[in-house]
Image (cartoon, rainbow, N blue to C red):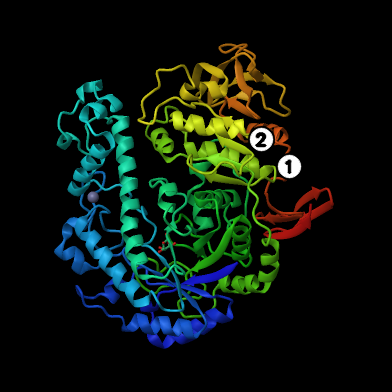
Amino acid sequence: MKLGVCYYPEHWSQKHWETDAKEMHTAGISIVRIAEFAWAKIEPEEGKYNWDWLDRSVETLASAGHQILLCTPTAAPPAWIINTHPDILPVDEEGRRRRFGSRRHYCPNNKTYHEYSKRITQAMAERYGDHPAVIGWQIDNEFGCYFARCYCETCTTEFQNWLQSKYASLDELNERWGTIFWSQTYDKWAQIEPHNLTVAEPNPSHVLDYYRFASDSWIAYQQIQIDALRESIPTTQFVTHNIIASQTTIDYHDLARDLDFVAWDSYPTGYAEMGSHDLYAPDEQIPAYAHDTGDPLLTGFFHSLTHGLKQSPYWIMEQQTGAINWSLYNTGVRPGALRLWAWQAAASGAEATVFFRWKASRFGLEQHHAGLRNHDGSADTGYADLLTIKAERQQLDDFVAQPLQTDIGILLDYSTLWAMEMQPHRKDFSCLKHLFVFYRACKALGLEADIISPQADLSRYKILLAPNTFLADETLAQKLDGFTTQGGTLLLGVRSGFKDIHNVVTEEPLPGVLRNLAGARVAKWHALPPKISYPIQSELADLDPDVTFWAEALEPADGTKMLANYSAAPFDGLAAITEKSHGNGKVIYCGIYPRFAQAVALMCHLAKLETISILDIPAGLTVFRRGEKLLAMNFTEEPIAFSTKSGEYSVAARDFSIITE
Ligand code: GAL
Ligand code: ZN
């Protein structure tokens, strides 16, 4: 694994640069990422470039043996641009135009900003495109951070254009959106505004298209920079972007498509302190991980999501190095935390870990944010860990030398996610939570999963988990059909095929376009309030008989097996889970919303169908497999016993062991 660091030469007097560059090198760092917020220093006045400092900084780093990752600085347009073109500033959901004075203050659809972005990108690419130490480019920084949906006048017009090219005629749009409801029928494109300031809740089809349009806007904006870069840079320099994997406002599958690889920014304690309620069910007991390591399942889910974007290796573009500044408690870290994160990243498929940041900043918003070095330049705790990682790197590279084997795909469709988010119907019904429970079940059995798009290549997976196919069309039905026909095992979940891709309920029996594939009909469905459960009985080993949260009553077609059925009113005798042979494969329709233990029982069954060997991973342990070797990681404060075919082991607290299966 390659090691890198984020560096802001513009924050320090030049007298530090050489020492910093040398110290980085000594610590095992070989990649330095610079310039992502440095626009005002690069172009202090319109058209007047100040390359001198950046040239010197690039040379200083290159002379110390570093490879350089340059970032386009468009996440922070300077005051002179905004001053002359205030319409670049975005408008939020409440209709307020936001101000200059932080970062990410631009509308992705603003044509003037497109020109400025293209110009600065071209200028940088022309200047450094042939520099031997520059290995690649990061476009902008974390699209969608703080806000992803702008509601300005430009966006309104662009939305109308976007709709016009999607639907061609207003009759078509009116039909697809069902605008007859509440007399929303449009007779001019210009009547269609963003949905943000309506009196009552807007039409869900309208909202979904606005979300899609907003996501497409970032992808189109990114493309302007990809094109500008590729005009001047050699093909040996890569182009990437650093996503916030936990954020759901941009369709990252689309965003990833034209990048050479993707990267994500990993802040494990921040997610553990603030993000666990986004993924765990509200009544779940979250395992007691160490306070300064984060929850490896949350972090792991984002690794799997990022790996799944291109089904290939990726980077960690920012790795937490100590206390962060945007969470609740912003815990400090003890020795060992960075080491665990780096090993987990590599085992999950990351090719590089770039630490954020070299030195803590003395000014600006992030003064309380740690780096590898303190404000005074001395080593912080994370730095000692970096030295450990450097010392263990050979061992790490040996472990990950064999490719990552992911037998399971978990389908994530952002349109479905958005549709459920705007109308969850039952409190806490969330697409990500539903995926996360299955992801955890996979990890509990030692299985690796990629979280993938419905357009992804499915042929590499043995099992496809598609618990959320709320929006479905024929294309998806055929794709899933092809997967099972060729021998794959598919799991569909509750609410499958409920709607078409315009966010309108199907007029076919449920699960709509997926019912032939499922081999069952959803006869009834109930959202269940807390403390209400419906009992089932099942031939599946260890399947907890209480259905909570959401229950569907299924009628299997001829030839479809019941794997579980309800044993009391109101769904007495009807199926809860079915299994159908389809081509060479199997389709399971899971009519219950599983709790963790139920998802584990289901996964055991699926693994058996595909003859995939499973492990029994004790709670608290996170295990990665490479060939015969297992990396058993313990993110808790207590040693954990683990037994495999080869023997009994104890994995020390906040540590890991490499053992033979
Ligand atoms: C990231 C961002 C960085 C820095 C960091 C602090 O989201 O990309 O620039 O702000 O957070 O944790
Ligand atoms: Zn806008």
Q: Which mark is residue 457?
A: none
**Residue 427 visible from this viewpoint:** no
Q: Residue 169 occupies which quadrant of the picture?
A: top left
Secondary structure category for the residue under label 1: loop
Q: Position of residue 193 (x, y in %)?
A: 20, 38
Ligand 1 sits in quadrant: bottom left
Secondary structure category for the residue under label 2: helix
Residue at 33% across, 36% down = 208
Residue at 77% across, 54% down = 628
Amino acid on which disc 2 is placed:
Met
Query: On the image, numbered disc 2 is attached to which residue?
Result: 603
With 352 as the anchor, is 229 left or right in this view? left
Label 1: few (<14), some (14–19) or many (≥20) C-alpha neighbours in 10 Å: some
**Residue 68 visible from this viewpoint:** yes
Query: On the image, numbered disc 1 is attached to which residue?
Result: 614
Give the camera-side residue of 235 and 633: 235
Give the camera-side residue of 88 and 227: 227
Residue at 44% across, 54% down = 244
Tell me if label 2 and label 1 are in contact, CB under 8 Å: yes
With 7 as the anchor, is 411 left or right in this view? right
